[in-house]
Image (cartoon, grey):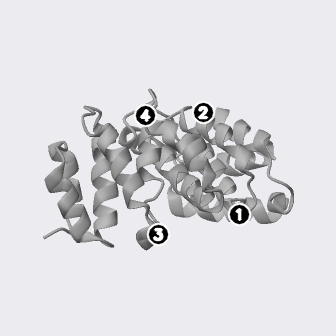
Amino acid sequence: MIEKLTYLYEKHRNEENAGPMKKYMKDHFPFLGIKSPLRKELEKQFFKETGILKEGFNKDFVIGLWEKDEREYQYTAITYMGKFIKKLPKDIFPFLERLITTKSWWDSVDSIAPLVGELAQKYPEVIEETIDSWSVHDNFWLRRTAILFQLKYKQQTNEDLLYDYIVKNADSKEFFIQKAIGWALREYSKTNPVSVKAFMEGNKLAPLSVREGSKYVS
């Protein structure tokens, strides 16, 4: 399967796009130069032609894509996982942790966080079993995931949990943690601006977090 996807993607390699795409990601990863709209079309074509989505979830396929150099393959691995999100078992979390902490950057981590969120709604016990420990993990990408996994929850947000994770990370000097805190607060403020305002006024947060979190708070 990976060979078929590689053949398809190589046909659309675009060096003119690849350079700027790599630069946008701070030169962390090489790119084929396939921009998102075309990549999504090619993913649909690949899924349809191979019938891979009719088979069971294949961890080896995801790992194989994760090990490839060009970043588009990791994006497709995440798309593939998303197609199986309603069928993934609870014991997928160590595997997700492996992906979050390998070839880590905001683009992959922020795409996996919503999958973690969906799984946590299906298996709420994983919050205590796994995500709680992520919120204080040495790996800041796991901490970022813990802060962001409820991003799409809206009224279903566990406010106490969100604020607890933020407080635990409030003194972090890491840009991606400060940014995540602000993003999570900004998103939740669309649902409960009064609560978010009170929280920000009652806790010492990094200026970046406050600036990001205040957008919808009067």
What's under tag 4, amino acid-wise?
Val
In front of the other: 214 or 193: 193
Question: Quarter-wise, where is residue 170 in the image?
Answer: top left
Q: Are marks 3 and 1 in contact (CB under 8 Å)?
A: no
Q: Earlier in the sequence, mark 3 or mark 4?
A: 4
Determine the residue positioned at 52% across, 57% down: 114
Count neighbours of disc 3 (C-alpha within 10 A) and say few if under 14, some if 14 to 19, many if 20 or more: few
Mark 3 or 1, closer to the camera: 3
Residue type at numbered disc 1: Lys
3 and 4 marks in contact (CB < 8 Å): no
Residue beneath disc 4: 136
Q: Amino acid at mark 3?
A: Gln
Q: Which residue is mark 1?
A: 86
Q: Is residue 90 visible?
A: yes
Q: CA distance from mark 2 to mark 3?
A: 38 Å
Residue nearest the observer in this picture, 28 or 59: 59
Asked if residue 135 is positioned above or below residue 50 in the image, the reply reads above
Q: Residues within 10 Å of mark 1 (few under 14, many from 20)?
A: few
Q: Circle 2 sits in a helix, a strand or a loop, which is it? A: loop
First along the sequence among labels 3 and 1 = 1
Residue for badge 2: 69
Per the image, the residue denoted by label 3 is: 156
Q: Residue at x 36, y 35 (%)?
A: 26
In screen coordinates, is 153 left or right of 212?
A: right
